[in-house]
Amino acid sequence: MSTTNLTNPKTSATLTIRLIKSFEFRTTKNLILRGVDLTATTVNQLVELCKHEIATQPKYKQFRSTQFDCLKLYTQAHGHKTTNLIINIDNPHWIIDDWNKFLSEIEIDGQHIENETELSLFNRQLYDSFILNPETKWE
């Protein structure tokens, strides 16, 4: 069993944020954040950091028009990934609602945010529409 999730301390974690612009067209891009202090960074601060990266980095230009307002656990290091390639639709309760909590305080089904965790950042209204009709238009 790998211990990738333990190679970095909670004060210097690497997180992969899956920026999702469109669920139907599977428009997504990974944002890799290194050196994140899970014990001192709130969910809100993480989202604001992501928004700053989107606003300032040219590679995220196509994502600037998206209203990112929802964060959801996707998977942990070496965890089971969903069959849906764009987002984990199997566990709707994995949405992180308390944006005032520190990342290290988040626990969902016994899972914590730790090194090498993947999170999805997206627009909640688009997500809710996709859940009602989970069809993709991109093949």
Image (tube, rainbow, N blue to C red):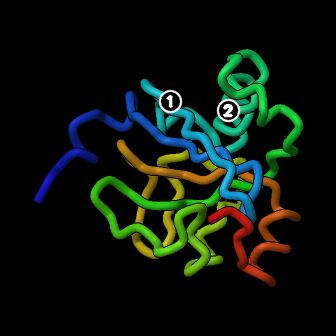
* Residue 102 x/y as whole percent: 58, 45
Kindly check if marks 2 and 1 are in contact, taking CB atoms under 8 A apart as contact: yes
Amino acid type indicated by mark 2:
Cys
Comparing 29 with 16, the one in front is: 29
| Frontmost residue, 76 versus 126 | 126
The picture places residue 52, in percent across and down from the top left corner, at 74, 23
**Viewport quadrant of the N terminus:** bottom left
Q: Position of residue 62 (x, y in %)?
A: 78, 33
- Report the residue marked by disc 1: 33
Judge by depth and name the residue closer to the eye, 33 or 61.
Answer: 61
**Label ID, residue 50:** 2
Quadrant in which the C terminus appears: bottom right
Q: Which mark is residue 52?
A: none
| Labels 2 and 1: the sequence-earlier one | 1
Which quadrant would residue 67 be assigned to in this image?
Answer: top right
Quick one: label 1, few (<14), some, or many (20+) residues within 10 Å?
some
